[in-house]
Amino acid sequence: MEHSPLSNLDSSEASSSSADDLILASSRPKKRAGRKKFRETRHPVYRGVRMRNAGKWVCELREPTEQRRVWLGTYPTPEMAARAHDVAALALRGRAACLNFADSVWRLPVPASTDARELRRCAAEAAEAFREKAPAPDERAEDYSGEYDDVMAELAEGALMSPPPCLGWRFSWDDEVASDDPADLELWSF
C-alpha cells in the first residue's frame, strides 16, 4: 500500500484542526487570464474546474512534482467538479492543498494511492455523493393528479351527452303562449 499524504491524519485530528490550517480557493482569488481573443472557460471561483461547450464542467489537476495533468472527469455541475478536484488535491498535496470547500478535509475520502486511475475513481465517487438529487414527487400529489384526470374525463364525456329528461314535468313554449296571461312572456313593454 502506498503512503498517502493524509494517511497519518485521522478523523479526530481533522475535526479538531483549526480553519487557519486550510487553504481555501476563496481566500486565494484567481488571477485574470491574459487571453483576450478567446472566451474564458475557467470557473470564476472553483480551482481546477472549467466549462466545456455543452455546458458540462471538467476537472483536471497538475501533479506537483511532474508537469503532467491528471484528468478527473466531466461533471454536470461545477460543484461536483470542484469536489472531484478537492479529492485529488488532498491525495497529491496533503495539507498544502488549495481546496474549494472547507469541509472537504473530513467529508471526502482520500485515495490510498496517487495513481491517476485511483484518483479518477475516488473523485467520481465523491462527486456522485454530492450530486443534487431531484425532489421526489409526493405520493399524495400523484394520487390526486390521477383522480383529477378521471374527473376531467368524466366532465368531458358529460358535455357530449344530451341532458336527461325531467321526470313528471315537461316544458313547452307552446304551453306558455296559450296561457291566459301573455304579459309573463313579454320582456319589454313599449
Image (cartoon, helix red, strand yellow):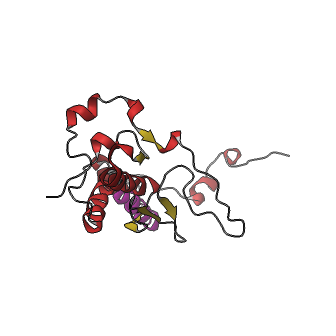
The quadrant where residue 11 appears: top left
> Residue placed farthest to the front in the image?
65
> Residue placed farthest to the right in the image?
190
Q: Can residue 147 be seen in this view?
A: no
Residue displayed at 54% across by 56% down: 43
Magenta highlight on residue 160: yes
Residue 132 drawn at (x, y percent) = 37, 52
Question: Is 131 located above or below residue 12 in the figure?
Answer: below
The quadrant of the image that shows the N terminus is: bottom left
Looking at the image, which is closer to me, 40 or 161? 40
> Residue placed farthest to the left in the image?
1
Name the magenta segment's main secondary structure.
helix
Question: Is 14 located above or below residue 137 in the figure?
Answer: above
Looking at the image, which is closer to me, 66 or 173? 66
Residue 16 drawn at (x, y percent) = 28, 28
Residue 50 drawn at (x, y percent) = 51, 62
Residue displayed at 65% across by 66% down: 39
Left or right, 125 with reference to 171 = left
Looking at the image, which is closer to me, 137 or 164? 137
Residue displayed at 44% across by 40% down: 23
Left or right, 51 with reference to 84 = right
Number of marks in picture: 0
Residue 146 drawn at (x, y percent) = 32, 57
Residue displayed at 31% across by 48% down: 138
Q: Is residue 187 visible?
A: yes
Magenta highlight on residue 24: no
Left or right, 187 with reference to 52 = right
Q: What stretch is highlighted in magenta?
A: 149-163
